[in-house]
Amino acid sequence: MNRTVKIGRNISFSIYDIVVLSFMAFLAYGIGILAKNWTGPLVYQTNISLSPVSLVGYTFLSMARGFAAYGLSLVFTFAYGYAAARNKYAERVLIPLLDVFQSVPVLGFLPGLVLGMMALFPHSVMGLEIASIIMIFTGQVWNMTFSFYQSLKSIPQELIEASKIYGLSGWRIFWDVEVPFAMPGLVWNSMMSMAGGWFFLSVCEAFTLGGRSYRIAGIGSYMATAVENGYVPGELYAILAMILMILAIDTFFWKPVVAWSDKFKFEENASADEPTSFVLDILRNSHVLKFFRTLFSNIKAPKKYVKPIPIKSEQEQSKVGGVVFYTILGLISGWMLWKFFSFMGKINIMDLNTILFEDGLTALRVYAAVAISVAWTLPVGILIGKNVSVSKKIQPVVQILASFPAPMIYPWFVMLFPDLNYSSILLMLLGTQWYILFNVIAGASSIPNQLKEAAEILKLSKFKVWTTLYIPTVLPFLITGMITAAGGAWNASIVTEYMTFNHKILEATGIGAFINEVTISGKMQLLVLSIVVMSLSVVAINRLIWRPMQRWAMEKFSLN
């Protein structure tokens, strides 16, 4: 059926354009509502209505914060991941820093963010909104950055060298070669990262700092209010709203992105079962978007010949650069240590021993959760990733499960397993196992079809195919997932070791519960010390165990 109407000689209009224009009008209306809400007068505790009707507006506000944080995460990922992958000096600083950042719990960013934003916007709720978005950002970004960095490190060097020989500039190589190559893994990790952001939603929208409570409207604050009051119907309404929101995001955002990114898969033969999306079909057939695509393609910079960039080996790089780099690094590190010890004053050795003990207990829970996660996500992730039809069916289910904020099911879970010293391990799984699963799916989906066809031609047994193709190929992705899962588990200890339910405090012995206590009481020195201890333990394990394993896997099993 022809759905296109000719209005003029060169102007066409179709039903797809009506859909696109309607969406653009709704988007403009939504931005207007957000602008009005975010520039309103400062209210420390927004009154949260537990009416289910109110959840419609709260859902929209939470979703807007999630997408704002995701946009911020994407910009950070491209800049940070590229710098770490392409500059050896930057890599030596940025990757350890990434280990530190991902291990710092969401609450660890809270004091500085809230105080800084309140100083910038003393009379507007904008400060609290930005602080909430940045906290969601800290729950999203690290996994994406690790994925992008790992993709850039494993890109076939022949592609980069060919691009330089053909005279492409660094900017063109980045957008035309490196970003497309990293796209499949980045898309899957973006889905996981968005889920990670939802996981901490209640903490990011309703929190206590220095004895003062802050609350902004959203699903997270609605759930926190319902949990505090023991209002079970409200908890169910919030879970339902969260499910509907995730399904909508999956249908209208992730499925089109997955279908679009499939063209970037690094293989010669197209898959017989490519992902599809009716939303992407609408966008591709819209004359309105075609007009904008043509407009932007016409204003691109004219092509000009670019002198081929000579390819330098590492031996040609200046030794003077190394001396300057380490001198600057030493000076900055010395200044930071001086500021740290000045702030801490005289450290109480008893407090330090307590923090070390609590940190050790949480570490045992974290790596127990990672081990349990690997046991089931490795086979399941490969099964999903190697079969597009299965992937399309499972993807929304996995997203919903991965996106559940722990506090939403925590009260019911605690009724079954009241001792948090043990049950918090299972609660960590709720948020961290998905990091491994999504990375394994990304690794399995990146296996070129010609390798699978070669295995069929050689008539290899299923066991042989798994042990010689699937598991070795996904191993670099698996280790990346384990690193981010461990970081996520450390972060999740904040909500799995401490909670308020029906006006009662439940807690385990661990660094997560300890950080909650000192945050609420406003003991900033103990908060900083506990975060430093947690970060150092994570970095030490990453440096001694995870990174050597990751280098080995990338060198031995990369598709390069």
Image (cartoon, grey):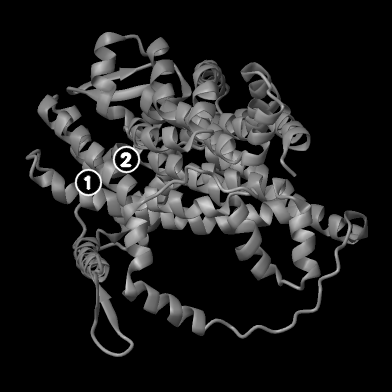
Q: Position of residue 249 (x, y in %)?
A: 31, 48
Name above or below for residue 299 compared with residue 400.
Answer: below
In the picture, the disc for residue 218 is 1
Given residues 471 and 117, the one toward you in this image is 471
Name the quadrant containing residue 244. Answer: top left
Can residue 139 be seen at all in this image of the molecule?
no
In the picture, the disc for residue 340 is none
Going by the numbered disc 2, the residue's amino acid type is Leu
Q: Secondary structure at mark 1?
A: loop
Name the quadrant containing residue 346. Answer: top right
Q: Secondary structure at mark 2?
A: helix
Pointer 2 residue: 201
- In the image, what residue occupies the spot 88% across and 55% down? 314
- In the image, what residue occupies the spot 47% across and 46% down? 274
- In the image, what residue occupies the spot 86% across and 56% down? 323
Q: CA distance from mark 1 to mark 2?
A: 9 Å
Name above or below for residue 471 compared with residue 3.
Answer: above
Going by the numbered disc 1, the residue's amino acid type is Gly
Q: Position of residue 145 (x, y in %)?
A: 57, 47
Quadrant of the drawing holding the C terminus? top right
Query: Outermost residue toward the bottom?
Result: 9
* Mark 1: few/some/many CA within 10 Å (<14, 14-19, 20+): many
Please tell me which of labels 1 and 2 falls first in the chain: 2
Count up the numbered dots.
Answer: 2
Callouts 1 and 2 close, C-beta under 8 Å? yes
Q: Position of residue 421 (x, y in %)?
A: 41, 12
Name above or below for residue 519 compared with residue 354.
Answer: below
- In the image, what residue occupies the spot 7% across and 44% down? 53
Given residues 526 and 390, the one toward you in this image is 390
Can residue 549 be seen at all in this image of the molecule?
yes
